[in-house]
Amino acid sequence: MFEPFPGNYVWNLGINLALIAGGNHGELDEVCRPVREAAKAGADAGSAQLFDSWIAVADQVVRNAERDEAEGFLLSAGAKYLRASGYYLGAERLQSRDYAPPWVAYDRGLELYHKGSALRGLHVEKVEIPYQGSSYPALFVHDGSGTPRPTLVSVNGLDSMKEQVDMAGHGAVNLERGMNTLFLDQPGTGEAIRKRNLPAIYDAERWGSPAFDYLLTRSDVIQSKIGIFGLSFGGYHAPRIAANDPRYALCAVMGANHVWGQRQRERVANEGENPVPHYWDHVMWVFGIDSHQAFLDYADQITLDGQVEKIRVPFLITHGENDRQIPAFNARRSYEQAVNSPKRTLRIFTKADFEVEHCGADNGTGMRDYIADWCAQTFDELTRNEG
């Protein structure tokens, strides 16, 4: 992984994710330079300084985009607005919940994501997924033709956001292979937690099945070809949903997360890297639980033991061999228990792939493209089987 901050995994991860989401190396270098000394104090201590540095660069990228737009160079402006969106969202993701400025940055990131997408001519629709008398937000990314296509439901990780996952290229590579994508901000993530105060839950089918129901209302979706994809903590959610809602035609994960609850107890003993600073405050906020012990007790339910055996559709598991957050045995455990899947596939990414870290954070293309290829191939096989 590119490591501008030696020894500070969390900050390095944030920069790598920004690069994957379309960030520019020159701009991100300007983010890193002023805070290299602060990084030595650890992920938590200097996070506010990192935020200020990131926002200064994001603000300048916006000014550059505005100049392009004023001159009529709309494609160039759109590209810059999208990069700035990624920077605002990336900066917010790394902050403590009691630090006020990130909320403004988050709103700015959402605004610029949609402005940049529109200027680039991308087909992105804001949609709402009904949930427990309310709803949570999602993005439907399509080609604008109205042609019915296979569709993937994309499930976030613990701290990711639907816009970031799309900007990491998942929507584009799926479209290249003839698939739409429904990017969720499921409860506990993105707008659902920030704007709706909808916390994460262990029984993800409660929000995963409504996403399927929504897609049944669209004429540009082939109803028999709706699959589900999850990354990071989504590597728990997506298989859990596929195990409990047999309507999903396939399931794929980027980073297995078979025993996530167990991993939380291991993190108490400082085993494994954390994804964000202020980790315990963050994760309790995500779940809406005030007590550390109560959170750990709740998290004990978050396991795929007894769930994966119920998956009866094609199931793909990808994982990096040197994942420093979630050990690779999670992937092998999910694979071994998926005994009822008619097509179970395990792909461990190695140094030869230039992608060994958590969810491909050191590359961003290997797992992403392989998952898109596998899903397109599997949807095609389902077509032939139907014939």
Image (cartoon, rainbow, N blue to C red):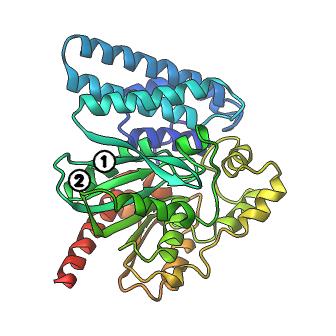
Q: Is residue 2 above or below residue 202?
A: above
Residue 325 place in picture, x, y as percent: 59, 58
Q: Secondary structure at mark 1?
A: strand
Instruction: Pick out the residue farthest to the front.
Output: 133
Q: Secondary structure at mark 2?
A: helix
Which amino acid does the dot numbered 2 rest on?
Answer: Leu
Q: Earlier in the sequence, mark 2 or mark 1?
A: 1
- Residue at x 40%, y 39% (from the top left corner): 19
Residue 183 appears in the figure: yes
Q: Is residue 31 above or below residue 373?
A: above
Distance from disc 2 to disc 1, alpha carbons, whole Å, reads: 8 Å
Quadrant in which the C terminus is drawn: bottom left
- Mark 2 lies on residue: 175
Q: Nearer the viewer, mark 2 or mark 1?
A: 1
Residue 342 place in picture, x, y as percent: 36, 86
Residue 117 place in picture, x, y as percent: 30, 34
Q: Residues within 10 Å of mark 1 (few under 14, many from 20)?
A: many
- Mark 1 lies on residue: 141
- Residue at x 73%, y 68% (from the top left corner): 300
Q: Are marks 2 and 1 in contact (CB under 8 Å)?
A: yes
